[in-house]
Amino acid sequence: MRRVLSIMLVGFVLFLSGCESEDENVLVVGLECNYAPFNWTTSNDSDEAVEIEGVEAYCDGYDVQVASYIADSLDMELQLRKIEWDGLIPALLSEEIDVIIAGMSPTPERATTVSFTNEYYRSEQVFVVADDSVYSSATLLSDFSGAAVIAQMSTLQDGLINQITGVVHQTALPDYPSLVASVSSGVSDALVAELPVAESIVASNSGLVIVRLGENGFEVAETDVSVSVAVRQEETDLLEDINDVLDGVSDETRNEWMSEALIRQP
């Protein structure tokens, strides 16, 4: 009997080992699926979209294109989990997901708890305002003095608002649809976003325009104008593997992916 039990136990251990090996071949990516053109939720099962785990919907966008390319290059199965922005890093640290690919900037504050790959996109910070607003012709950051400005909570953009002297820094909102509604309704004079997101907003919301200040805009660090993949700090091999993949993607290809995402966005 002991021999039979031992054989059964060995078989059970081997079975568990086999399951673990299968799990290791899956790349679980966390993202909002609510941050076009980087990522958005759709009911369309297209060549670019990937099914969201546990949800009868798909996620599409630039981030999904990057995630698919990384997973394919590493010969791994891609799995997407839709998670609210504030929950992404906690989900990564609790091992609910393997990586974050969600238009996240590699800020020094975030880098204290997670590690970041090399950038996979570079952008700029801009304003979105009503086209008939006095702020639509702004050329200096100081032109927004006295304006009611808003951004998404727990983001770089919300912190940048404080650089505007005399600004009315409104309470941050959880997502971009809420931010757009706030500006469109006149509750806010402007929202701060990175350029691709702003382009997505004005493409689907007539009456809104982008204000780009160039060198007269926000003072930002290199990490403020780039987005990277976040991994757990102990996952050094995965970090290196993803960096190797990203190093093989040209700027031309990245810009093409973003242009296609802007065209596909809802």
Image (cartoon, helix red, strand yellow):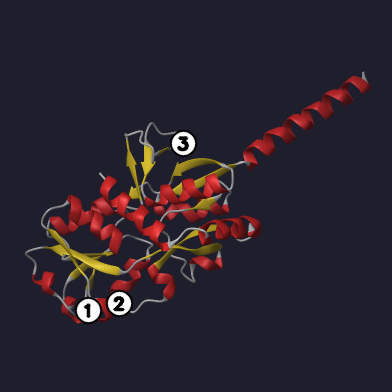
Q: Is residue 172 visible?
A: no
Tell me how far mark 1 sits from mark 3, CA to CA: 42 Å
Judged left or right of residue 71, residue 152 is: left
Mark 3 or mark 2: which comes first in sequence? 3
Label 3 close to label 2 by CB (< 8 Å): no
Name the image quarter holding the N terminus.
top right
Residue labelled with disc 2: 218
Label 2 close to label 1 by CB (< 8 Å): yes
Circle on res. 141: 1
Mark 2 or mark 1: which comes first in sequence? 1
Residue labelled with disc 3: 53
Looking at the rendered structure, the kind of residue marked 1 is Leu
Looking at the rendered structure, the kind of residue marked 2 is Phe
Judged left or right of residue 189, residue 242 is: right
The residue located at (16%, 76%) in the rendering is: 146
Mark 1 or mark 3: which comes first in sequence? 3
The residue located at (12%, 69%) in the rendering is: 136
Label 1 close to label 3 by CB (< 8 Å): no
Q: Position of residue 175 (x, y in %)?
A: 31, 53
Q: Is residue 56 above or below residue 228?
A: above
Q: Is residue 127 visible?
A: yes
Secondary structure, mark 3, is loop
Tell me how far mark 3 sits from mark 2, CA to CA: 38 Å
Looking at the rendered structure, the kind of residue marked 3 is Glu
Tell me how far mark 2 sits from mark 1, CA to CA: 7 Å
Which residue, as the protein is rendered here, is positioned at the far left? 132
Judged left or right of residue 175, residue 226 is: right
